[in-house]
Image: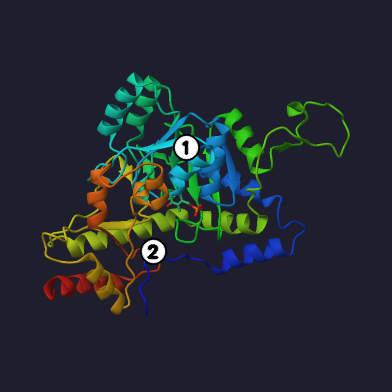
Amino acid sequence: MNISYSKQDINNEDIESVIKVLKSDFLTQGPVIELFENEINKYCNSKYSVAVNSATSALHIACLSIGLGQGDWLWTSPITFAASSNCGLLCGANVDFVDIDIDTYNIDIDLLTEKLKIAEKDNKLPKVVIPVHMGGKPCDMKKIYELSIIYGFKIIEDASHALGASYHKGKIGSCDYSDITVFSFHPVKMITTGEGGLATTNDHLIFEQMKLYRNHGITRNTEMMKNKLNEPWHYEQINLGLNYRLSDISSALGLNQLKRLDEFVNIRNNLALNYNEFFKNINISLPHSDKNIQSSFHLYIIRMDFDKMNLSKKDMFNYFYENSINLNVHYIPVHLHPYYKNLGFNKGDFPISEKYYLQAITLPLHTKITLKEQEKVYNTLIEFIDNK
Ligand SMILES: *Cc1c(COP(=O)(O)O)cnc(C)c1O
């Protein structure tokens, strides 16, 4: 049997909940999406939620809702999925990056502070900063929040990995230290809706804007309309939006998956401890831990100094593949993609991310992996290192 790096966890109740919607009157724009949004609010302790068809869409409407546009700057870190910065480009804004911290793989707070000081002098302060909770490990949000007060930027948390993670006892998604938090429900993420995403916020105006952008910029709320016609069929388009709606079919799956989120987080944390125990005596970097946070452990990332160990990452990938184990790498630094190079970014711009990229490997981790399979991952690594 193949050991995959990630896998969804669907049970019979999940399947039944989807069938129930298929037999109901509404496949989309029905009652289930709101039930799902309300349950996420309860779980995360947020006021408002807007469910959409992907985290990419959620990031896009999040940026639109805070008015990001031409001439503005969006900052994030290079070790992320390209959607974290593409959302800025889609709004016509400029994008820049802040390098990562080599221990946490999250945005480096000292480098962020330095870059803000320079940007203030140059009159190029960011309108929004998007911290990415890499692998499910929350960024130091209090510090980023303090900087946002000083320099006046908005914060959108890219928590695509971090549903179920906690920061100083608060759940990620509570927006205690941000304006908006975005989650992904792609099958490899913490819970799934097939494709899907969601944005939480405590700001009513941002909430209303995101709902508008999700649905073509159309409202049926008379208070928001220009013409108070009082005709029962009347609706108005007051913004230029998109169709980013999540169907009730997908929402039903998410709603039922959410019941097991805490169980998923516990299983993943225990599996991470198993790996830590296996690897404690070999010379590789293990995931960083911190008493003030609980990672969701969406990813278990190790770092190896391949040059120093006289090994090749490519050989390692192939060796594991031959042994039916799929590894992965999160991520190719965004600024090194051809599209971003065309925008003017170059190799060497963010050296810590680039060094991280050479060393990082994502090991298989999902709720169905067994201790035996984890042991096989460990043994395969030892064999690879010994037989180089
Ligand atoms: C998965 C992911 C996204 C995009 O999620 P989709 O739901 O696939 O659009 C964005 N940012 C990060 C960090 C991700 O891991």
The residue depicted at 54 percent of the width and 44 percent of the height is 58
Numbered-mark total: 2
- Residue 303 horizontal/vertical position (percent): 22, 56
Residue 288 % position (x, y): 24, 48
Residue that appears at 43% across and 26% down: 153
Measured Cα–Cα span from mark 2 to mark 1: 25 Å
Q: Which residue is mark 2?
A: 366
Above or below 257: residue 217: above
Q: Earlier in the sequence, mark 2 or mark 1?
A: 1
Could you tell me if residue 47 is visible in this image?
A: no
Tell me which corner region of the image, top left, top right, bottom left or bottom right, holds residue 270. bottom left
Q: Is residue 260 left or right of residue 64?
A: left
The amino acid type of the residue labelled 2 equals His
In this picture, residue 319 sits left or right of residue 17:
left
Residue 365: horizontal and vertical position, in percent? 35, 63
The type of residue carrying mark 1 is Ser
Nearest the eye: 381 or 153: 153
- Nearer to us in this view, 135 or 373: 135
- Mark 1 surroundings within 10 Å by alpha-carbon count, few (fewer than 14), some (14 through 19), many (20 or more): many
Callout 1 secondary element: loop
Residue drawn at x 43%, y 57% as measured from the top left: 263
Q: Quadrant of the N terminus?
A: bottom left
Instruction: Give how far across and how far down residue 167 sits, in percent.
Output: 36, 39
Residue 305 placement, left or right of 157 = left
Q: Is residue 54 above or below residue 344?
A: below
Residue 96 appears in the picture as rendered: yes
- The residue indicated by pointer 1 is 174
